[in-house]
Amino acid sequence: MSKILFENIYKKIISRLDQELPGSLVYHNVNHTKYVLEKAVKLAASENITGRELELIKIAALYHDTGFLLSHIEHENLGCLIASRDLQELFLDPVEIDMICGMIAATKIPQRPKNIFEKIVADADLFYLGTPNYNQFSKKLYKELKHFDPSINDEKWLKIQVNFLSSHSYHTKYGKEILEPVKRDILNSLCLR
């Protein structure tokens, strides 16, 4: 895949997300997609993945939340449909499109990635859980979820966070070694509230 092709895909997807996502998506917005792309590249580098495989990871990261353009329900499946349609028009190999859809599907909670590519995109999607910026992202997600379910209050949100962080595991070596310890500290601090 040429650099020009990826840049065209990037411009198209970022533009669509920026212009078409509803304003209520304060977490799952264009900035989240850019963040996941950046972290996917970082995780791929830590796994020594380059070339065509890296390009496919980058494309999956770009498309992973495009389903939100249609609905917040089953958005991973919708994202795969959007990616499949777009990428068939660009004459990508059907096997590669399936790989991309697998990476998108791997971001569905609970995450169940089956290979290193899926593990990278899954960990990139939830990279923030193991960073000092956790609270910044968490506040945005809380606001977004509250839009869809006004019954969520601070107490419920705390329980949701504790349950989610307790059940989540990173899949890549970087995630396990670098992000997991920070996530555990965040979980411990939440449990003290």
Image (cartoon, rainbow, N blue to C red):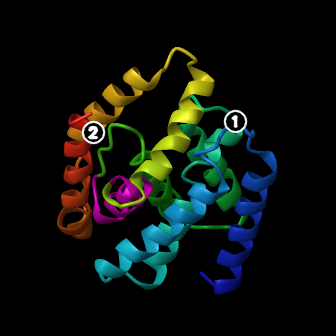
Q: Quadrant of residue 78?
A: top right
Dot 2 alpha-carbon crowd within 10 angstroms: few under 14, some 14 to 19, many 20 or more = some
Q: Nearer the viewer, residue 23 or 53?
A: 23
Q: Amino acid at mark 2?
A: Leu
Q: Which residues are magenta?
A: 114-129
Q: Nearer the viewer, residue 25 or 138?
A: 138
Residue 159 x/y as whole percent: 31, 26
Residue 66 in view (yes/no): yes
What residue would you read off at disc 1? 24
Q: Secondary structure at mark 1?
A: loop
19 up-or-down from 13: above or below: above
Residue 76 in view (yes/no): no
Q: Secondary structure at mark 2?
A: helix
Dot in front, 1 or 2: 2
Residue 156 x/y as whole percent: 39, 21
What separation in Å lies between label 1 and label 2 (alpha carbons)? Answer: 26 Å
The C terminus, quarter of image: top left
